[in-house]
Image (tube, rainbow, N blue to C red):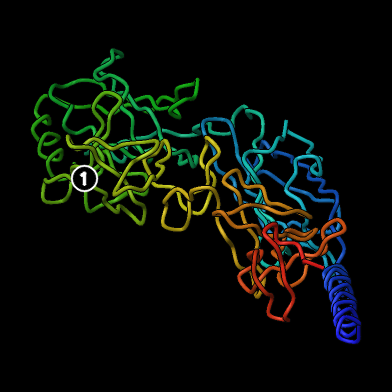
Amino acid sequence: MKRYAKLAVRLLTAAGIMAAAFAMTSWADDEDREKITSIKLNFSFDTYDREVTVDGEGDFYVDDYDVTTSGNTPKVKVYLEADDGYYFSSKSSSIFKLSGEGAKLSGTPSIVNDKTEMRVTVQLNDIDGWNDIDEAYWENDDTAIAHWTDTGSSKYQVRLYRNGTAKTSAITVHNNVYNFNGYIDESGRYTFKVRVDDGDSWNASDTLYVESGEVSHFQNLSHDQISLNNSGPNGSSSGQWIQQGNLWWYRNADGSYTTSNWQQINGKWYFFDPSGWMMTGWINWNNKLYYCDASGAMLTNTTTPDGFYVGPDGALVQGGQWIQQGDLWWYRNADGSYTTNNWQNIGGKLYFFDASGWMKTGWIQWGNKWYYCDASGAMLVNTTTPDGLRVGADGAWVQ
């Protein structure tokens, strides 16, 4: 009887210690910080300066924001930081209250840096005049190099006219300059019109007058300055982006082009098929999947338009990704969500995550039973725990 009594005392003591430890762990998580339960953001647009302003209300502040556009549709990536004593606890759309300019969430927010920072992307309604081109002009009277206002758009359409009649079809370019010298093959009055690629209104240039004796001069310039045309999204001068129909390929400085492989161009990775055409969407490469956006650039460390997560190397994170912040770990699911106050099966093993989504180790009380998670976070089954107690096939402490 003494032996059983001693064992019972030992088990009760262990249970008490585990309960106290569990309570202390939960207390420590919330002791110094409170959850941010509401995020209010208001967006406004200054027509004169073409600037978006973001104002926040809540237990956080707007640290910074970046604006990108597609036509007249702006997207704003907002960087939020929690006030002292607070942390971001949820990515749910229900905590966001967005106002102004038709603001709505785009994609899944991300929480980083011990949950003190949040990154959220917001799409605004089309803003008339956002990408209007204010000015279109020739570089000078001796060259047919077209210039126009840089609106920040990734693509423009430009078209050459002679004596009021279209000389070329609409040409898509990626910067705000184009060399038309090669098209000056007869005398006349030359103008060009330009617009943002998916915009509605064209902006007309002034007139370039070419006499019959000047045509050869412009033709010679077309060979000297051809590198201005078809430059890539970042204005590469070491090669040329060339469009044919709806397809793009990249001509290297030596005239070669990449096939069935990746190529880094101005710091971004692009994939080209066996014929040398730039690919978009999902790319299967060496048994891994990568995603290239509409510009052809490979995405990294983000969620793809169809809701999957790609890691820092651009590869699809199958089923999710473990993320470490300081000494803590959490698990980002493929859709950007994470588990709180529950177990999750990851790779055939069970892990427990607390109210803030952090992985827990040691003894876990779940319902009326106790379970043990080792240093890796995995629940132990059919074995003896480091402190000498037995857990069964379901992981529960065998009392």
Residue at image point 42% right, 52% down? 314
Q: Is residue 381 above or below residue 296?
A: below
Q: Nearer the viewer, residue 73 or 387?
A: 387
Q: Position of residue 261 (x, y in %)?
A: 23, 47
Q: Amino acid at mark 1?
A: Ser
> What residue lies at 86% left-to-right and 85% top-to-bottom?
3
- Which residue in the structure is indicated by mark 1? 227
Left or right of 298? Residue 113 is: right
Q: Can the viewer see residue 141? A: no
- The x and y percentages for residue 358 are 71, 63
Tell me if residue 351 comes above or below residue 293 in the rendering: below
Quarter of the picture holding the C terminus: bottom right
Q: Is residue 175 visible?
A: yes
Apparent side of residue 384 relative to residue 83 in the rendered image (left or right): left
Residue at the top extreme, as displayed: 165
**Placement of the N terminus among the 4 image quadrants:** bottom right
Would you place residue 397 above or below residue 268 in this image?
below
SS for dot 1: helix
Picture coordinates of residue 375, whole percent (x, y): 63, 74
Q: Position of residue 387 (x, y in %)?
A: 73, 81
Q: Residues within 10 Å of mark 1 (few under 14, many from 20)?
A: some
Count of marks overlaid on the render: 1
| Residue drawn at point x = 62 percent, y = 40 percent | 107
Apparent side of residue 313 relative to residue 25 in the rendered image (left or right): left
User: Toward which corner of the image does residue 73 lie, by quadrant?
Assistant: top right
Left or right of residue 200, residue 385 in this image: right
The one nearer the camera, 211 or 360, is 360
Q: What is the quadrant of residue 365 in the picture? A: bottom right
Nearer-the-camera pick, 395 or 324: 395
